[in-house]
Amino acid sequence: MEFRGKTYHFLNHYYVCDESGEEFTDEATGEINFAQVYNQYREENNIPFVNEIVKLRKDCQLSKADMGRLLGFGENQYYLYELGEVPSPSNGRLMRTFIDNREALMCAIQESSIKESNKEKALSALSQLTEKENKDKAIAHLLFPVKHSIYNGYAITSVNKVRQMILFFLGHMSIGYKTALNKLMFYADFLMYKEHCVGISGLTYSALPYGNVPNNFKVLYGIFDEVDEIDDEKPYFKPLTGCDLSVFNDNEIRVLEYVAEKMSKQTSSALSETNHTEDAWLKYKHDTKLLVPFCEAFSLKAL
């Protein structure tokens, strides 16, 4: 597909009419096709993804109108970016600066034409958020070897999302064995990508003998204070608190609930057998150091 003067390759989704043999797309398949191209363009030009743009505004606790004023785009233009329109490289660079540089963002808010009460609210929210993020920095370094690429499903790297995702599945499992939890995490991330071309957790995955696993899975489930490791004959994990679903959007919640409903009560061995039928495991099992690209989500068999 041609986009802004360059050709991009993507996996084409379409239907074929049984009677005429004619190929056609609908809105859903068209969105998946375009999203694959837009993802590549954003990555190449360091342009923020929709989930990053939305998160930036929510972190500031600003309205779309105020965010448009802050960035100098105007409310309507900014609104289109949240809906999925790809920003120009210059507008993308400006948003990327504010996403990556909290001090620059706070300075811009102070100097903006936003109402004073909204400025104070935004600066207070960002200060509190920075404190929370600093606590999770060491964990983030461990969990996220790559950011915004095909190898993490172009997802935002959020320690809290990983935390809440683990708590969600542990809350639905009979016993929280590591092998089974690995598979639930994999299927949720990859199903989300299959349907929306973006993952949930920001984690990367490899193919090990027992199936696909998040990288650093050996320590992943034991680094959170909200999860207790039970040192039994066969160690397992249990949640010490409930999951905070507010960190997920509606599509993510639907995918998490679907995976939990279909898979959370299965045994570890059954989930491993199922996972061993997936291209995401079969094509990468020969080298455990390889990261599995999320484009393998389009060939998922179990879901």
Image: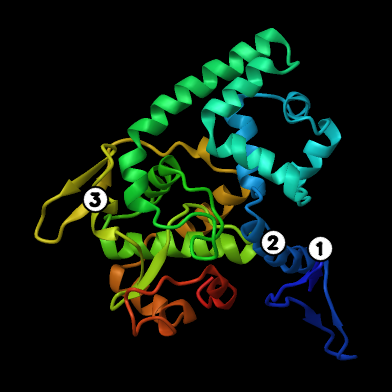
> For mark 2, does the 10 Å Cα neighbourhood hold few (<14), some (14 to 19), or many (20 or more) residues?
some
Q: Is residue 276 above or below residue 2?
A: below
Q: Residue at x 21, y 55 (%)?
A: 236
* Residue 45 in the image, given as x and y percentages of width and height: 66, 56
Q: Colour scheme used in the picture?
A: rainbow
Q: Nearer the viewer, residue 242 or 65?
A: 65
Q: Are marks 3 and 1 in contact (CB under 8 Å)?
A: no
Q: Secondary structure at mark 1?
A: loop
- Considering only vertical position in the picture, is 11 above or below 113? below
Name the amino acid type tagged 2: Tyr
Q: Residues within 10 Å of mark 1 (few under 14, many from 20)?
A: few
Mark 2 highlights which residue? 41
Residue corresponding to mark 1: 4
Q: Callout 3, which amino acid?
A: Phe
> Measured from the top left, where is residue 64 in percent x and y?
75, 29
> Residue visible at 82% across and 31% down?
75
Q: CA distance from mark 2 to mark 3?
A: 40 Å
Q: Quadrant of residue 19?
A: bottom right
Marks 2/1 in contact by CB < 8 Å: the verdict is yes
Residue 219, image x, y percentages: 24, 54
What is the distance, in whole Å, between disc 2 and disc 1 at their CAs?
A: 9 Å
Residue type indicated by callout 1: Arg
Residue in the picture at 66% in, 50% down = 47
Residue receiving disc 3: 237
Residue 95 location (% of width, % of height):
66, 39
- For numbered disc 2, what is the local secondary structure? helix
Residue drawn at x 55%, y 48% as measured from the top left: 253
Q: Earlier in the sequence, mark 2 or mark 3?
A: 2
Quarter of the C terminus within the rendering? bottom right
> Which quadrant is the N terminus positioned in?
bottom right
Q: Residue furthest right?
A: 20
| Residue in front for this viewpoint, 182 or 204 | 204
